[in-house]
Amino acid sequence: MVEVERLTNEALDSISKSDWEKCVEHAEKIQDEDNEKEILRDSLTEPMILTLASDDSDFGTDGDSENDVEELE
């Protein structure tokens, strides 16, 4: 584990400030592009409203017997 920590620290120390800045700029560019795509998707997607209505069946009520469950299997 000590060796892994040493190698990690060496790798991080070898990265220049310029390299970090480029990575951050790249990540921010990707995030901005993703945000623009999400806004476009939201504007093109029509809202969908689902209305769940109760029915007259008694399936799923507390009164279900073991026989009812067995019949469904």
Image (cartoon, helix red, strand yellow):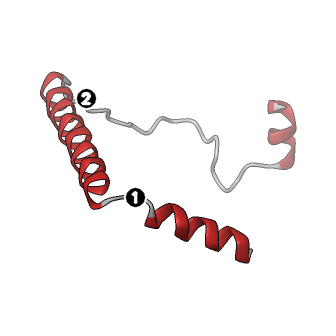
Disc 2 + disc 1, Cβ < 8 Å = no
Q: Helix or strand or loop: what does disc 2 sit on?
A: loop
Looking at the image, is 41 positioned above or below residue 23? above
**CA–CA distance in space, label 2 to label 1:** 49 Å
Amino acid type at image mark 2: Met
Q: Residue at x 87, y 42 (%)?
A: 67
- Considering depth in this image, is 70 or 47 the residue closer to the camera? 47
Work out which quarter of the rendered image holds the N terminus and state it.
Answer: bottom right
x, y (%) of residue 25? 21, 47
The earlier-in-sequence mark between 2 and 1 is 1
Amino acid type at image mark 1: Ile
Label 1 crowd (10 A; few <14 / some 14-19 / many >=20): few
Q: Residue at x 30, y 56 (%)?
A: 20
x, y (%) of residue 56? 51, 36
Q: Residue at x 44, y 61 (%)?
A: 14
Looking at the image, is 70 positioned above or below residue 20? above
Q: Helix or strand or loop: what does disc 1 sit on?
A: loop
Q: Which residue is mark 1?
A: 15
x, y (%) of residue 16? 33, 59
